[in-house]
Image (tube, rainbow, N blue to C red):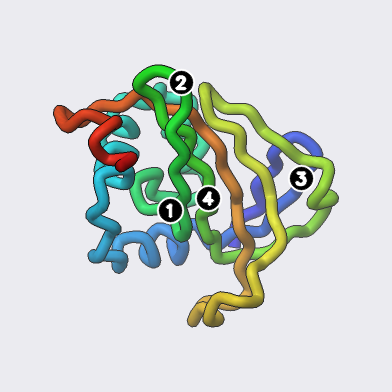
Amino acid sequence: MKEVRIEDWLLNIEVEKTAAMYEDVTEVCDCQYCKNFRKASLALDKEVLHFCNVLGLDIHKPSAINAFPVEGEQVMYSGHYTICGEIIAGELEAWDKVVGAHCFSLIEKDDQKPKLDTEPHIHIGFEVVLQWQLPESIELIEK
């Protein structure tokens, strides 16, 4: 386990175990919104990629994702990533970390989902607005 400090938070993370968990994810959603998320994520700035690497996350494989079209050719994505580890210090309601265009936060575990093989684990929530990158028109997908 590795202690990681992010502003007022202190996390105890198994970075290698988290990274291995994401490597094992071979099936990803194939809808147009998720394809766009992965394509748009290829152009993220180094600060966002570094943040994810420190935590062992694969930015392209969120544990849960939602997509909402917004004005213009943009989509707001929200969801979370799962991290093997635990919170040592910090309050859930007190943390929003803006990295590039992303807003990350620690969120409560979703008890509705099946338990992971890796306990303990925490969730890092995210919100980001990304440009539509696919050749298909976003208007056609909404219908």
Where is residue 138 shown, x and y percent of the image? 28, 31
Which dot marks residue 71? 2
Give the mark, 1 or 3, whose residue is nearer the N terminus: 3
Residue 46 point in image, percent of width and height: 41, 24
Could you tell me if the residues under marks 4 and 1 are in contact, i.e. CB atoms within 8 Å? Answer: yes
* Of the two numbered discs 1 and 2 in the rendering, the one whose residue sits closer to the viewer: 2
Q: Do callouts 1 and 3 mark residues in contact (Cβ within 8 Å)?
A: no
User: Which residue sits furthest left?
Assistant: 135
Q: Quadrant of the C terminus?
A: top left
Q: What's the residue type where badge 3 is placed?
A: Trp
Say which element carries label 3. Answer: strand
Give whichever of 88, 137 is nearer the camera. Answer: 137
Residue 127 placement, left or right of 96: left
Determine the CA span between mark 4 and mark 2: 20 Å
Q: Amino acid at mark 1?
A: Pro
Estimate how packed mark 3 is, as few (under 14), some (14 to 19) or many (20 or more) residues with alpha carbons within 10 Å. Answer: some
Whether 32 is drawn above or below 63: the answer is above
Q: Earlier in the sequence, mark 4 or mark 3?
A: 3
How many neighbours does mark 2 have within 10 angstroms: few (below 14), some (14-19), or many (20 or more)?
few
User: What numbered label is drawn on residue 79?
Assistant: 4
Q: Quadrant of the N terminus?
A: bottom right
Type of the residue with mark 4: Gly
* Tag of residue 45: none
